Amino acid sequence: MKKKVFLSFFVVFFFLNTALLLIATDFNFYGFFKLNMAYDSGYLYPGNFALYSKDPERTKNLFYLSVNESRFGVNIKGNKIGDFNLTGKVEVDFMGGGPENKSHLKMRHAYLKLSNKSFSILAGQTWDIIAPLNPLSFNYSVMWFGGNIGFRRVQLRIENNFEFGGGNRFMIQAGIFRTIAKDYDLNGIDDDVSSGMPSLQARVSSKINIAGSSFFEIGLSGHYGKIKTFVSTTSDNSKNYITNSLDFDFLFKSKYIKIMGEYFNGKNLATFLAGIGQDINFDKGVEISSKGGWFDCIITPTKKLTISAGYSVDNPDDKNLSEGDKSKNSVIFGNIIYKIKKELRFGVEINRWTTDYYKENEFSANRFQFVIMYIF
């Protein structure tokens, strides 16, 4: 049965990929140049962007200058197949590692999509279905490890929209995903592959128009997957560990104000960029549970000016932790963006990161960031 599922996935992907190459008619290139300048009062790991605060020891007053977040992509449009539109996307940035002045490319998106007005099927790599929103921040990690769950991974998903009464909408999304896990037992095979199954994600949401261009949208989502790790390299005994979450998101948007946020509760969430990057405590033989979320209020008083402020927190369960593990990570953030033109914008942001370590100390640091962006 499992072989049939994977075979079906690859057949669909191969068909869509071949069809797109044969009948693509329009290529729309896009991207942006982004210069980041950041000053940190203490040590925020890993440096060019922030995930959590660490013991600065004697390291304080750090300055970073980078263009690695600059992004390039192409949207591809094919001819219609019956009533369906065939589209695709490939997008990269320069956050793939390497020396600062010789940075490597990093794949962000690479997918094909077959869609009509109400139904679509997507094959490739893009965002998770769960918790689809991101706070407005210049930080590349957009509060990952600090309360914002969800990332990008390879998937095969379907979604269906049901419209009712004046543009109101109810949507169902579901798909199979690459789980992603480390090779914990060091047998040369990633432990998500050893599980013999993909992870599952699903989300239901409703969008309600209020007045004019204002609307309110809420969503409930979740995921489930497992990994299998062997007790040792010489033993056939194995143990399964579960990764799961239940997530809630909301968005209110009007002409001048956007208010949005998310909440999550789950376990073994490191590859979903929650749990402050902690997945399994092998000393205790348990998955690390965590809960958290974020809130962001964005005001656009003029077409040129945007102001944003919010709070984010990731709070692992202490009973799953060992001494020295990260037990809480919170961020207070705010920024101002000014558009000189539609394509050219400047921004400043202030963040305060506070990270607690179980049965040890708490460390805090402030980040002051200045950004120049040219969007094309």
Image: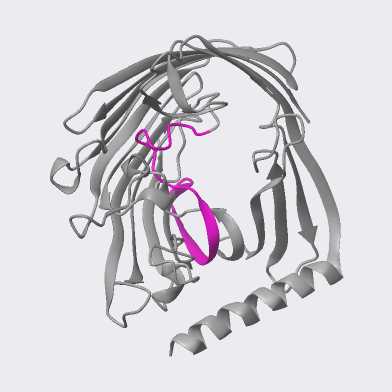
User: Residue at the spot x=42%, y=75% of the render?
Assistant: 194
User: Residue at the spot x=56%, y=83% of the render?
Assistant: 8
The mark tally for this picture is 0
Relative to 98, 333 lies left or right: left
What residue span does the magenta drawing correspond to? Answer: 141-168
Colour logic: one colour
Relative to 360, 29 lies left or right: right
Indicate the position of residue 289 as horizontal and vertical percent values: 23, 49
| Foreground of the two, 85 or 167 | 85
From this view, report whether residue 210 is shown above or below residue 160.
Answer: above
User: Residue at the spot x=50%, y=14% of the render?
Assistant: 335
Check the image and name the residue furthest to the left. 319
Q: In which quarter of the image is the N terminus?
A: bottom left
Relative to 28, 360 lies left or right: left
Q: Does the magenta stretch include residue 161?
A: yes
Work out whether residue 199 can be spotted.
yes
Indicate the position of residue 44 as horizontal and vertical percent values: 45, 23
Indicate the position of residue 129 as horizontal and vertical percent values: 45, 55
Indicate the position of residue 262 as horizontal and vertical percent values: 34, 38
User: Residue at the spot x=64%, y=82% of the render?
Assistant: 11
Q: Is residue 282 magenta?
A: no
Check the image and name the residue furthest to the front. 234
Q: In which quarter of the image is the C terminus?
A: top right
| Foreground of the two, 112 or 241 | 241
Work out whether residue 337 can be spotted.
no
From this view, report whether residue 230 is shown above or below residue 46.
Answer: below
| Foreground of the two, 192 or 99 | 99
From this view, report whether residue 35 is shown above or below residue 225.
Answer: above
Residue 12: quarter of image: bottom right
